[in-house]
């Protein structure tokens, strides 16, 4: 399913392709979230035009509204969204465990109440896999406990051991459904272990030894604390199986984070931040230096705050090196006017730019590796 | 400036072209509102893709935010919006007079306070024309009192007489500015008179006798009460000068209204309703019968309420005869999901369809006239 096209000579980055039922994706790739079957304010044609090759839907959100059975009856998530490229679903673990006091975990699964209408749901590993197959996604994720960094070693051991027991059940259910429905959906296992190096390495070895199509690195730290994320990747790298894609879940708050994990051997990543901060007025700028792997610009954190008064009369595009349709057509001044007027049009243009800019930066990295 | 291409043999409708500084528009045409320099949730590329040929901006709203002087300094409204087709501005009269108790009218103009920050504005006919020239629109409208239907005959006479005195001042200022700036902006006069037939006919004769490029029919009734609007058009029609475009201000709550005024000799119209009701969940459906000039569908008022449960599993497009990108790509079920989820993407797709559907219906009418 996964092929390495070229390994970088300057970093641990690589160009690869992952084949799915809805076509190939070229890695490293950022997977923007289409949480409930839409990427807030972008339609499927827009998503394609950002050069995104795959989107992520959230099992938890889809389960609550409009429901996995509804989507199955409709003919699957691709048909519903009119999106023809690959779709990955998370397992719902992250959202369910973030309900904290509203969730009760047993060996069998997680019991929680819908914050929408109070309906009780009991999600087992098997149930999560069934939901994802009902949605009809291309890549199914294991149902795991997204572990808090506050866990003691003892708690962490209990949690990860249960997560890997659940992993076995997920794989079994996944294979059963692929066979029953005559589908070839991919399945990724998830490595947990928090900040415990031994648990992380041990977990990676367990997941890599099983029949999985890809390996995800999950947990509270990943993406949230980039310093620790990089440390974890650095010590996990020697243990990465070379023939499987590596996916850091929740990484990609900004293009720099995406580059930072790519040069540490990661192939796939997702994050809500580029779209969310776009809506709130932060737009990505800067230029990737393919020698130092650093993105530089005169703006703090390579983000332009569009509400800033300095942009009132600024006729320049968001980022002069960006080729997205927003930068080709609209000025900072006009975008600021739309932002201050709170028009939905702002959300669309801002989201389009931020996501497009992430993919462009990754394409520059791929181009660099290709020509090394 | 205005040429009749063909008169219908079956109605008073006609195909015409109006030439402006930013190109020609083919009439009859619906002009969607881009109130503050944007058509809520649609960008300029979207607007073009709806087959709209001209948009309307609101002088009152632009004056308050971001300001006509700001737009002039920026290089004009076309450059600001990155919209290359013609733009018409209303004069601000409608909005200013709807402030009612917050506005004080004298012979010289109207004094009012900004509802945004309380700033006092005194708008004279000259000032309104200056603002519109500062915006850099193609078609400038006269500053008038948008007359209430509740006026007594005496009040109506006072109001219309002042409106036509103001019209002379508007024309003078408009010519002065066109000369000074070496521009060829068009100017439309506005006929008022409420429900008084004699005042309406007399008003039309006054406006038609002056140096105007087009004639607008304004007032509270127009568009709001279609029965009375049609009555007014029917008795005004014999007095319409044949070489000038006729514009009913505020007509176009639905495609049927647009057809109804087109077949009564009207060439241009604008209304916020198609975009507004789209956002609130009403989508246009139906098929124009070019013999009866009636639009028919199985839905009440030819509007589909997308929130209705009957659309939950409906895989059909909004309107099967519609060729817009929304109808080609998304189902009623998906649009309902977006509407229920309150995502800005819904606003865009819904607005796009409603406006596109209006232009399509008018194109069908034009096609019919062409082939008569």
Image (cartoon, coloured by chain):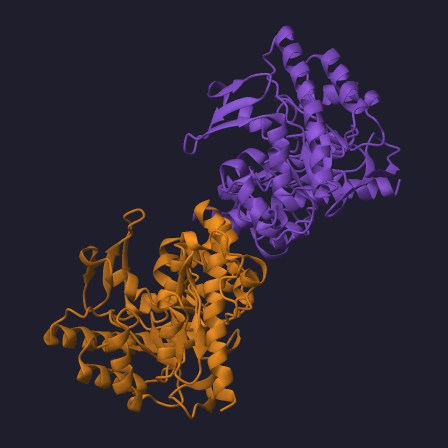
Chain colours: A orange, B purple
Q: Give the vertical position of A371 relative to B333 (above or below).
A: below
Q: Quadrant of residue B45?
A: bottom right
Q: Residue at x 43, y 86 (%)?
A: A14
Q: Quadrant for the N terminus of chain B, please.
A: top right
In the displayed structure, does residue B201 sit left or right of residue A98? right
Position in image of residue A224 (x %, y %):
28, 68
Task: Please report the residue visible at 35 percent of the width from the left and 65 percent of the height from the top.
Answer: A300
Q: Image point 49% across, 48% down: which residue?
A: A337
Which of the pair A343/A222 is nearer the observer? A343
Q: Would you place residue B171 above or below residue B55 in this image?
A: above
Q: Position of residue B158 (x, y in %)?
A: 64, 11
Which one is in front, A333 or B253?
Answer: A333
Quarter occupied by residue B368: top right
Question: Is A4 on the left-hand or right-hand side of B35?
Answer: left
As displayed, is residue A49 above or below residue B342? below
Residue B83 in picture, x, y percent from top left = 64, 51
């Amino acid at each position: 399913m996964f092929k390495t096209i070229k390994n970088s000579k300057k970093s641990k980055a690589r160009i690869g392709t992952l084949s799915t039922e809805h076509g190939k994706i070229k890695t490293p790739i950022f997977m923007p979230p289409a949480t409930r079957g839409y990427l807030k304010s972008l339609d499927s044609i827009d998503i394609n035009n950002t050069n995104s090759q795959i989107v992520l839907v959230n099992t938890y959100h889809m389960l609550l509204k409009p429901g996995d059975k509804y989507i199955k009856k409709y003919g699957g998530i691709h048909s519903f969204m009119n999106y023809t490229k690959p779709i990955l679903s998370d397992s719902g673990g992250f959202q369910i465990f973030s309900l904290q006091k509203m969730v009760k975990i047993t060996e069998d699964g997680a019991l929680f109440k819908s914050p929408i209408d109070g309906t009780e749901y009991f999600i087992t590993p098997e149930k999560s896999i069934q939901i994802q197959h009902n949605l009809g996604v291309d890549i199914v994720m294991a149902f795991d406990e997204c572990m808090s960094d506050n866990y003691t070693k003892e708690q962490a051991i209990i949690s990860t051991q249960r997560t890997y027991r659940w992993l076995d059940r997920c794989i079994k259910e996944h294979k059963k459904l692929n066979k029953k429905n005559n589908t070839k959906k991919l399945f990724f296992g998830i490595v947990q272990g928090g900040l415990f190096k031994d648990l992380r390495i041990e977990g990676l070895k367990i997941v890599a030894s099983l029949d999985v199509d890809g390996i995800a690195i999950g947990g509270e730290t990943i993406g949230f604390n980039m310093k620790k994320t990089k440390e974890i990747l650095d010590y996990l790298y020697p243990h990465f199986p070379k023939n499987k894609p590596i996916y850091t879940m929740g990484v990609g708050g900004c293009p720099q984070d995406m580059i930072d994990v790519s040069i540490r051997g990661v192939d796939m990543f997702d994050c809500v931040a580029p779209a969310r901060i776009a809506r709130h007025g932060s737009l990505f700028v800067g230029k990737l230096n393919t020698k130092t792997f650093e993105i530089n610009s005169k703006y703090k954190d390579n983000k332009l705050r569009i509400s800033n008064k300095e942009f009132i009369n600024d006729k320049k595009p968001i980022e002069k090196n960006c080729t997205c349709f927003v930068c080709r057509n609209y000025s900072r001044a006009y975008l600021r006017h739309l932002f201050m007027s709170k028009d939905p049009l702002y959300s669309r243009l801002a989201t389009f730019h931020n996501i497009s800019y992430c993919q462009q930066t990754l394409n520059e990295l791929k181009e660099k590796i290709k020509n090394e």
